[in-house]
Amino acid sequence: MSGFGLNIGKGGDFLPTIRINGKDGGVERSTWDGTNRGLEVIDDFVALFDFATLQVGWIEFSDKGLDKRLVAIGDPLPERPSEKHKQGIQLVVQLPDNLGCHELCSTAIGVVAALEGIYNATIAAPEWDNGRGQVPVVRLAEFIREKTRHGARAVPVFQIIAWKDRTSELEEHRASPRPRAAMPASTTSAQPVPTTTSAQPAATGAKEMTPPASAPSRTTVPDFG
Amino acid sequence: MHLPTTDPEVSSAGAAAAIRSHRHNPFEAHGIDHISVSQLNLWAAAPGVYVMERLLGLKAPVGAAAHRGTAVEAGVIAGLMGASLAEAIDTANAVFTERTALSSDPRRDKERDALASMVEQGIALLIPWGRPDRTQVRKEWRMDGIAVPVLGFSDAEYDAHGLIVDLKTSHALPSAIRTSHARQVASYLGAGANLGGGVAYVTAKKAALYQLENAAAHVAALTRMAHSLQNFLAISTDARELASLITVDTDSYYLADPCARQHAFETFGV
């Protein structure tokens, strides 16, 4: 991070994007052949969703492009820049078959709510291990069409179909909150060293585990390299 | 053939080397080539009983309750791996019978009566998690600064859930994981491993699977316990001398067996 607190030059600039159409359904990704930019429809959207890259804040979609004022989870939300800016989120996902990392950015209520659902499922999973573990392979199973007083919308239904180790490409885009006085001096993601200075003995665990709703998915997992 | 030397300098040099070796690995002098979490738990709970059993070799017969645990575990694992309930109960009964054939423990029949219900409860609790990918997995790892490895066996491992489960039987269902059990499961997870742990408690009427918390803290506690044991063993290579440094609580659960009580009297004079 630069001295101005901006994420410049981290290798995370100008990623191609994924657009989930929260009104009519469908998924597109931006393409770049070295000369022309284009859009490509993705029929079966499956990707590594790395919520360690998640950022939240204010986003304005305009003819000039995107204006994003985003922060990592754990940082205070910035002031709303304008009435045109909506609350939204952004995370980095990695597509299979060497298509690489893409930014998934949305302010659509249905899309954000669906992403929140898969986010909650992810961080509750033991595989996630507080961001130090694996990354879910997420499939967009379907769109549920709804009519609201603001018009039609298409709500994506996401499913975790497998877990994979975090790739080095995703690791480059990890979003970390800025250190604050109340936080430990080190923000390393390494396993915390057991300390003897704890004021009380560690709890052992009294939370009952519930079995999975169904047998683990045997859906074929694409190759992420 | 090596004859004892009569040269005092050579003799003292040899003794010094032996002492250095024992200081380096105090376990070695007492014939200990590995430790287990249950041994460390015993050391923490009843150091005198540890010295009596592990260093002096004065072990009391294992009670029927311990064999019940082994038998139920065998039955539940059999059921999870595909055996019918009847076959699983038969497995538990067979293991229990084999282990207690010569037991005079008055609780033997009571423990045998509980086997079938416990096996049924255990299978019902764990079958929704699917078939384990591995059972009775050998776990050997080392603690920083401890001269011997730690050895244990996890009961069931589930790759799809990233979960290691240890099965415990009891006549009363705990409301949380007992500390000694938490240490055991934590030791199976390993530092930095992407796995969660759980303890499945099974009684004849109820069962619950609790999620392990603070695994790293429990491993740290185990490490401190191991250091205290290692330091204690470094005091002397003579187990009798070590026994003279401590004593036992004669009302302890560990001395409930008459044989164990007699051993304690003979060792500690109390």
Image: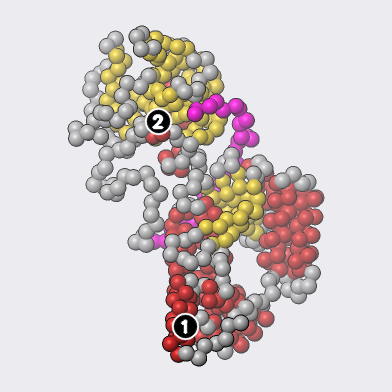
Q: Are marks 2 and 1 in contact (CB under 8 Å)?
A: no
Query: Which span of residues is magenta-colored?
Result: A200-225
Task: Give the CA separation, mark 2 to mark 1.
Answer: 59 Å
The circle drawn on residue A123 is none
Measured as percent of width and height from the top left, residue B49 is found at 57, 77
Same chain? Circles 2 and 1: no
SS category of the residue bearing label 2: helix
Residue bearing the label numbered 2: A169
Give the image location of residue A81, x and y in percent: 23, 22
Placement of B121 over or under A91, stated as above or below: below
**Residue at image point 43% right, 57% down:** B217
Crowd band around label 1 with a 10 angstrom C-alpha radius: few (<14), some (14–19), many (20+) = few
Chief secondary structure of the magenta portion: loop
Residue A168 visible, this angle: yes
Residue at (66%, 57%) from the top-left corner?
B203
Question: From the viewer's perspective, is residue A173 above or below residue B184?
Answer: above
Q: Amino acid at mark 1?
A: Ala
Chain name for mark 2: A
- Quadrant of the rendered structure where residue B4 is? bottom right
Please identify the quadrant where the C terminus of chain B is shown: bottom right
Looking at the rendered image, the quarter that the N terminus of chain B falls into is bottom right
Q: Which residue is denoted by mark 1 in the rendering?
A: B15
Depth check, front residue: B18 or B256: B18
